[in-house]
């Protein structure tokens, strides 16, 4: 082995080898003549978006894949398929794929520098990689960073591999531009997002997100269509009038000010309308808890139980006292300290956020905000009930949902939480018709703690503090963050500044591409150049691949065997999939190139590093693991179907055991799944509403965000304890201002931008690009569509704005933010708020040897920032609507 | 028996799943699309709306393209589906000029999907159905329809905005929807009698 | 033949060799090098075809009308005119076949014969005209009655061919005056105009010349009025019709002709220059009709709001094909003259 390493390093130093990326077109080998005339159909499972749950049929003829279509009659898509899913064939037959293991021979790294690839065998590639990783592991396992992303979400062994390796450093490249998880974790105990019950909802307000139409999701779009047909009213608060907004009421808003709208709406409900679901607030929230001057629950001496103020006895009582009548609104003196109910504190906190105040920020007329608040409250049908499967639920057919374009600003977590307050005021949380979590739908999600409030789940559950920080992504300083490649980059470039006591020695890309999918790409390139060894499990020549030392080519998704549990969908729920527990499989098509299944790569590497078998090895970690999102409902190694940690398994054998042990299964394994392609188990639909598990006053949601405050307090204490400043920030109040228990308006990080940066850039997902999976931007079928789409790959401006700036349709411009600049062509459209520069999708970028299509279009992400002072302090979310200026490009080609 | 389609514009979200499903089904060369979705907007800010108009071939009962074809390359099949026999087409393009719906395209050249790259195995197999110098158009997925399946665009539509069926049968979904919503063809004025009807156009 | 004619003939031979090569390239390899695209389905080739065939129709309509009425006619001028018509017809058909995606399958038109297709009738009428011209040009029309029949046939097919050209676009336009670019009076008027111009050219130096100049003046009036009428009705109605170039050109020609007539300026060759200018004007008119018409979106506003209009720039091959077809027309014309002036007498002498 060492000889290979030696040869490799020698080669690097000698810069031998030639130009390795010939420009000549790829010669496809002829189809196997023995397959002439053969026709067959395989069960497919789509993976052209992050959700990847659409059932498909893959048709083959003469050994060639000739068609991929939705599988009729099978949930969740029931035969339908979006444009990305329909373009799957092109991601198989893609000449820009990596077709054989490659090794870099040019030590100089850069996006446009030819690595002078040398073709090597799998044995060599795996040996070199394993040896490098082994050396890193022996020194300090934390020196390995695994960068995951939507590009490879079919793996089941990545996490076990990381755990067996012993590094905490796994970073999702996709996360910080979509930090939508905290409030859902806190209020619903779920991950990833809150959704709407489109089977029952009658009035839905949606901000910064799409229910499906805008980026063409199969289930979401159909559910919405049905709900609209049923008469649901849809209100879209958005700087852009999308297809979705066009189907409902469009409320144009100045980008980045959704939080002000939410505050004003809550203000109107609290001060003007004053109709609440009192029963919900008293029984199911911590509204009635008495809060001391320190902002914490006032607790009963002895039992330590939070106190409430009893309406009848006019005394503080423990919250769970039988027969007590807690006051929603009360003030009392306990031990000489004035205590208020949580409800009163929240209400007082919102006193100044009048609709008139919000109008100046959002440009939404105050009367419109009032009207929407009124309509929302009256549509909530407070007091009504509904029977589902013999169980009586409160019926609240309204929901307000927020997502990435609301949460991805400084103060975004507050905004998300304010949305929850609005829903809680009318009691539309986790009941039919209302705002629901998606993910794990079971009792565990809202199990109460001894305080009576439910335990925060997933990202709302704070990460422990260690110092010096363990995690290169600095999660110690952002205990509720989503993924943090942007922080990792800062830490890799300046480890000292971020208190890191080790150096990153190896970078392992597994479907993640932060260079294209995050911000300030040049910084990522710099960081990757700094790391001595980089390996990429690569599907195509993307940016991390061209910077890698070793490329381990993987199957395109059609070639990957996959067995996956069905996750509740991201946008909405309805009778179509409500109650559905399902596992689905993908039968692989024959592989085209010398590629491997990602999980086989992990097993091979683990074997060579010596971490596959035995205690603490990869198989052990597989045995111990549980589905991160749907826990025991997912595919786990349930006894007796566990792996013998001393044996070697194939992926099929692992899947077989998982299927046999599936909670809702019938004990059969992969063979039987191979016959049907999926197994569905329909639970009663009442199981989907978490109210069902703890009805009445059995559990409480936080209305007064006690947990958030405590997290902030603990973080502050830890900083004091180790006597360190908050890294990357001058005034730490800038951080702790966002850890208050009652949301308050905070200024955006963009307010300081010079005056000429007078517009705010916005971005949205499109039917052709929803997330960076299977290189959809390099897919020629989709490219043909987006090039014909008037709103794609252009800079959209309101006609009034264009007139003021004397910019014309089709004019070439430069758009610059404080962090980067991009080029584009103007599109004048009435569908945009005048303060907006609309830039869709994730275009631009590109690397040498990759698909030329990847280079086309404006790269919105290059306008964004990875600076810590631009982030939302809780979720570490990046600012998604930076201020920009637009200038004509003179002499543009 | 007369095959027809109803497209509900109130449901359509302009995603072009139909266009790509059609490409996948029919393997049309790059630049040739049997289905096209016109994207446009109406109104002024702040009451403007984003709109779309998906346009397959209208499969007119009285097709102008068929009349101008000097060699009967364009013909009407059972159920009124209008198709082109590529062996008979002389490439005069009079039918494209005659069509009021932009439904037809001339194959100037068989373009590969990946620019400056060779034809993939998929293209090698599928492009057999196309010939340079002839005219191509939507065929209502006649092969699927003959097997009793709906056209690919109908099958894939994510908002179920497209419905396919027999216009002559008053009980069929299409006839029922046309009656219910007073669906009308797009630009029926030239007397073409299209078989594609739009709801809420 | 004069020295000047020989120069033109020689030049045409050269052009025809080059143009012929590109035409045969187009015939054998189909459309690989055109400036056409999905937006511009028909271009210079069809424009040339329409122009040349409309010249021929114009000439034949005038010639056959004279003959049919039994009026005294300048036999020599008409002979030349029919030679020219023959050349134009052959040239135009060459251009038409070169403009097919599958040129050799074009012969299927005769085999399959869809009599509902305007294209079938177009080909039939042009072919009939060609045969008639050939019969006339080879002096096979010997008797008076036969001549009348010939004239009747020519007039019918020439008018018919013009009428057929108006049928292609019918389905794409609504009814109404001049909303139909190939239809109405305009196509006929322009054809007559070019016919008049060509006849005035052939009658140069002949006593009948002034007659044809008079005819040309009448046709110029006709064209100018029809164009102006189209503009006025277009502006009054909903149609966007802004063909100012055509109107200007026709009025300039009108002024030139009237000025020349009123001032009695016998400027040498001015009349010929005007006649050539008329031919150019007709060629431009065909450009507006074909390319200009296709520039408009087929699907109306607002559906076509964001539609891009790619430019149409005829490729070298298209220009060369056009030049080839035009030179072919000229060659046939001179070929017939040479045949009659030099070859047939020699044959006669030889046969004794």
Image (tube, coloured by chain):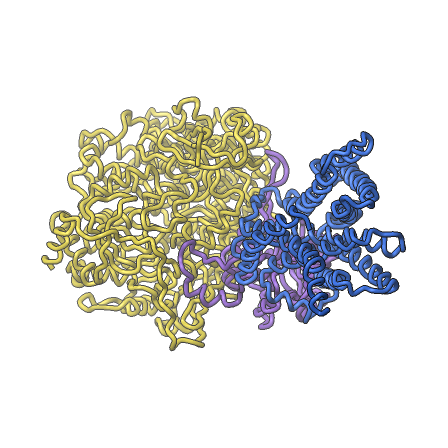
Chain colours: A yellow, B purple, C blue
Q: Is residue A27 above or below residue C174?
A: below
Left/right placement of residue C194 relative to residue A387 reads right
Q: x, y (%) of residue A726? A: 25, 30
Left/right placement of residue B69 relative to residue A628 reads right
Quadrant including the C terminus of chain A: top left
Q: Is residue A697 above or below residue A41?
A: above
Q: Is residue A370 visible?
A: yes
Q: Is residue A381 visible?
A: no
Q: Is residue A601 above or below residue A421?
A: below
Residues C235 and A479: in front is C235
Residues A157 and A467: in front is A157
Left/right placement of residue A773 relative to residue A606 reads right
Quadrant including the N terminus of chain A: bottom left
The residue at the point 78 percent across, 41 percent down is: C223
Residues A256 and A853: in front is A853
Q: x, y (%) of residue A545? A: 28, 50
* Displayed quadrant of residue A294: top left
The residue at the point 32 percent across, 35 percent down is: A866
The residue at the point 51 percent across, 27 percent down is: A358
Q: x, y (%) of residue B42? A: 63, 40
Q: x, y (%) of residue A232? A: 59, 47
* Displayed quadrant of residue A664: bottom left
Residues A41 and A495: in front is A41
* Displayed quadrant of residue A665: bottom left
């Amino acid at each position: 082995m060492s000889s290979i390493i030696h040869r490799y390093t020698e080669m690097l130093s000698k810069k031998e080898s030639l130009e390795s990326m010939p420009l000549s077109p790829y010669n496809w080998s002829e189809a196997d003549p023995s397959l002439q005339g053969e026709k067959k159909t395989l069960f497919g499972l789509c993976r052209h978006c992050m959700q990847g749950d659409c059932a498909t049929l893959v048709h083959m003829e003469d050994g060639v894949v000739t068609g991929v279509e939705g599988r009729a009659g099978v949930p969740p898509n029931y035969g339908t398929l979006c444009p990305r899913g329909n373009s799957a064939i092109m991601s198989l037959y893609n000449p820009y794929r990596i077709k054989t293991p490659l090794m870099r021979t040019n030590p100089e790294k850069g996006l446009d520098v030819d690595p002078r690839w040398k073709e090597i065998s799998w044995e060599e590639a795996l040996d070199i990689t394993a040896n490098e990783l082994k050396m890193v592991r022996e020194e300090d396992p934390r020196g390995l960073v695994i960068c995951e992303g939507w590009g490879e979400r079919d793996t089941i062994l990545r996490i076990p591999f990381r755990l067996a390796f012993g590094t905490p450093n796994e970073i999702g490249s996709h996360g910080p531009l979509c930090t939508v998880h905290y409030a859902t974790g806190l209020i619903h105990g779920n991950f990833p997002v809150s959704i709407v019950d489109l089977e029952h909802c009658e009035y839905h307000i949606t901000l910064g997100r799409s229910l499906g139409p805008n980026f063409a999701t199969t289930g979401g779009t159909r559910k919405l269509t049905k709900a609209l047909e049923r008469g649901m009213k849809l209100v879209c608060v958005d700087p852009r009038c999308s297809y979705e907004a066009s189907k409902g009421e469009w409320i144009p808003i100045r980008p980045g000010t959704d939080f002000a709208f939410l505050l004003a709406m809550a203000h109107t409900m609290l001060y003007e309308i004053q109709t609440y679901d009192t029963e919900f607030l008293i029984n199911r929230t911590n509204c009635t808890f008495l809060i001391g001057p320190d902002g914490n629950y006032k607790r009963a001496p002895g039992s330590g139980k939070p106190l409430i103020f009893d309406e009848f006895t006019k005394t503080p009582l423990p919250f769970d006292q039988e027969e007590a009548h807690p006051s929603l609104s009360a003030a009392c003196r306990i031990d000489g300290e004035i205590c208020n109910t949580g409800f009163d504190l929240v209400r007082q906190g919102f006193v100044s956020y009048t609709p008139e105040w919000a109008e100046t920020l959002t440009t939404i007329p105050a009367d419109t905000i009032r009207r929407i608040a009124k309509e929302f409250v009256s549509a909530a049908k407070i007091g009504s009930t509904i029977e589902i499967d013999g169980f009586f639920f409160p019926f609240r057919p309204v929901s307000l949902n927020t997502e990435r374009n609301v949460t991805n600003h400084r103060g975004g977590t507050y905004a998300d939480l304010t949305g929850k307050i609005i829903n809680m005021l009318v009691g539309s949380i986790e009941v039919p018709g209302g705002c629901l979590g998606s993910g794990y739908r079971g009792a565990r999600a809202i199990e109460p703690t001894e305080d009576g409030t439910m335990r925060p789940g997933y990202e709302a559950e704070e990460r422990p503090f260690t110092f010096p920080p363990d995690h290169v992504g600095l999660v110690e300083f952002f205990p509720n963050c989503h993924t943090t490649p942007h922080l990792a980059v800062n830490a890799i470039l300046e480890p000292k500044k971020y208190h890191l006591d080790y150096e990153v020695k190896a970078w392992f890309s597994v479907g993640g591409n932060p260079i294209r999918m995050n911000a300030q790409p040049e910084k990522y390139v710099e960081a990757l150049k700094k790391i001595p060894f980089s390996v990429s499990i690569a599907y195509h020549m993307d940016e991390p691949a061209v910077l890698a030392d070793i490329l381990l080519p993987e199957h395109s998704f059609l070639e990957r065997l996959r067995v996956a549990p069905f996750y509740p969908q991201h946008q909405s729920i309805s009778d179509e999939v409500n109650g559905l527990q399902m596992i689905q499989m993908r039968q692989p098509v024959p592989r085209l190139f010398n590629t491997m299944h990602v999980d086989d790569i992990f097993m091979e590497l683990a074997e060579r590093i010596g971490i596959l078998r035995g205690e603490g090895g990869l198989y052990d970690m597989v045995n111990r693991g549980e589905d991160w999102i749907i826990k025991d409902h997912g595919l786990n190694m349930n006894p007796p179907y566990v792996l013998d940690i001393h044996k070697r398994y194939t992926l099929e054998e692992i899947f077989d055991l998982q299927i046999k042990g599936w909670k809702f299964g019938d004990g059969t394994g992969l063979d039987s799944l191979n016959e049907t392609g999926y197994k569905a188990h329909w639970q009663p639909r009442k199981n989907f509403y978490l109210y069902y598990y703890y009805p009445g006053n059995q559990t409480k949601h936080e209305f007064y965000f006690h947990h958030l405050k405590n997290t902030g307090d603990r973080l502050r204490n830890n900083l004091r304890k180790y006597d360190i400043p908050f890294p990357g920030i001058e005034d730490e109040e800038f951080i702790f201002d966002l850890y208050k228990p009652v949301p308050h308006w905070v200024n955006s990080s963009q307010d300081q931008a010079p005056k000429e940066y007078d517009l705010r850039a916005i971005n949205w997902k499109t039917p052709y690009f929803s997330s960076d999976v299977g290189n959809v931007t390099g897919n020629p079928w989709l490219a043909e569509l987006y090039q014909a789409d008037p709103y794609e790959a252009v800079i959209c401006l309101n006609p009034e704005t264009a007139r003021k700036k004397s910019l014309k349709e089709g004019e070439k411009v430069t758009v610059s933010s404080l962090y980067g600049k991009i080029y584009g062509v103007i599109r004048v459209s009435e569908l945009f708020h005048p303060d907006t520069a609309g830039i869709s999708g994730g275009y631009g970028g590109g690397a040498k040897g990759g698909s030329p299509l990847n280079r086309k279009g404006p790269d919105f992400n290059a306008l964004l920032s990875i600076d810590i002072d631009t982030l939302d302090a809780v979720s570490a979310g990046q600012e998604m609507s930076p201020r920009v200026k637009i200038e004509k490009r003179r002499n543009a080609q | 028996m007369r095959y027809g389609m109803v497209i509900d514009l109130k449901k359509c979200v302009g995603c072009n799943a139909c266009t790509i499903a059609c490409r996948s089904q029919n393997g049309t060369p790059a630049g040739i699309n049997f289905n096209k979705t016109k994207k446009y907007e109406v109104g002024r800010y702040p009451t403007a709306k984003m709109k779309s108009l998906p346009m397959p071939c209208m499969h007119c009962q009285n097709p102008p393209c068929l009349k101008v074809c000097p060699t009967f390359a364009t013909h009407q099949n059972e159920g009124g589906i209008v198709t082109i026999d590529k062996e008979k087409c002389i490439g005069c393009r009079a039918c494209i000029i005659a069509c009021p719906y932009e439904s037809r395209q001339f194959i100037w050249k068989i373009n590969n999907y990946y620019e400056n790259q060779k034809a993939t195995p998929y293209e090698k197999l599928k492009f057999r159905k196309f010939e340079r110098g002839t005219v191509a158009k939507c065929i209502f997925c006649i092969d699927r329809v003959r097997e009793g399946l709906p056209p690919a665009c109908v099958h894939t539509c994510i908002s179920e905005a497209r419905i396919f069926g027999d216009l002559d049968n008053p009980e069929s979904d299409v006839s029922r929807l046309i009656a219910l919503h007073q669906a009308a063809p797009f630009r029926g004025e030239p007397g073409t009698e299209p078989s594609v009807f739009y709801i809420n156009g | 033949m004069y020295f000047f004619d020989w120069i033109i003939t020689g030049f045409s031979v050269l052009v025809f060799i080059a143009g012929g090569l590109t035409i045969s390239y187009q015939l054998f390899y189909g459309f690989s090098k055109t400036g056409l695209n999905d937006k511009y389905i028909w271009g210079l080739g069809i424009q040339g075809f329409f122009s040349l065939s409309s010249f021929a129709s114009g000439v034949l309509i005038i010639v056959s009308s004279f003959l049919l009425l039994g009026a005294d006619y300048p036999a020599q001028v008409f002979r030349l005119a029919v030679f020219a018509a023959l050349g134009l017809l052959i040239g135009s058909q060459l251009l038409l076949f070169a403009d097919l995606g599958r040129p050799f399958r074009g012969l299927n038109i005769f085999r399959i014969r869809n009599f509902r297709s305007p294209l079938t009738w177009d080909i039939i009428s042009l072919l009939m005209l060609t045969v008639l011209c050939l019969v006339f040009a080879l002096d096979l029309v010997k008797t008076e009655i036969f001549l009348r029949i010939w004239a009747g046939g020519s007039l019918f097919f020439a008018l018919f061919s013009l009428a057929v050209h108006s049928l292609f676009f019918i389905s794409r336009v609504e009814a109404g005056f001049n909303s139909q670019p190939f239809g109405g009076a305009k196509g006929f008027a322009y054809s007559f105009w070019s016919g008049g111009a060509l006849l005035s050219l052939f009658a140069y130096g002949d006593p009948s010349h002034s007659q044809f100049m008079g005819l040309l003046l009448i046709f110029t009036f006709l064209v100018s009025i029809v164009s102006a009428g189209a503009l006025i009705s277009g502006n009054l109605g909903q149609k966007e019709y802004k063909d100012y170039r055509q109107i200007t050109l026709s009025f300039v020609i009108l002024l030139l002709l009237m000025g020349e007539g009123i001032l009695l300026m016998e400027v040498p060759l001015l009349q010929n220059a005007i006649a050539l200018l008329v031919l150019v004007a007709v060629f431009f008119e065909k450009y507006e009709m074909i390319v200009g018409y296709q520039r408009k979106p087929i699907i109306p506003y607002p559906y076509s709001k964001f539609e891009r209009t790619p430019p149409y720039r005829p490729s070298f091959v298209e220009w060369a094909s056009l030049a080839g077809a035009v030179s072919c027309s000229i060659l046939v014309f001179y070929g017939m003259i040479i045949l009659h002036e030099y070859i047939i007498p020699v044959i006669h002498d030889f046969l004794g």
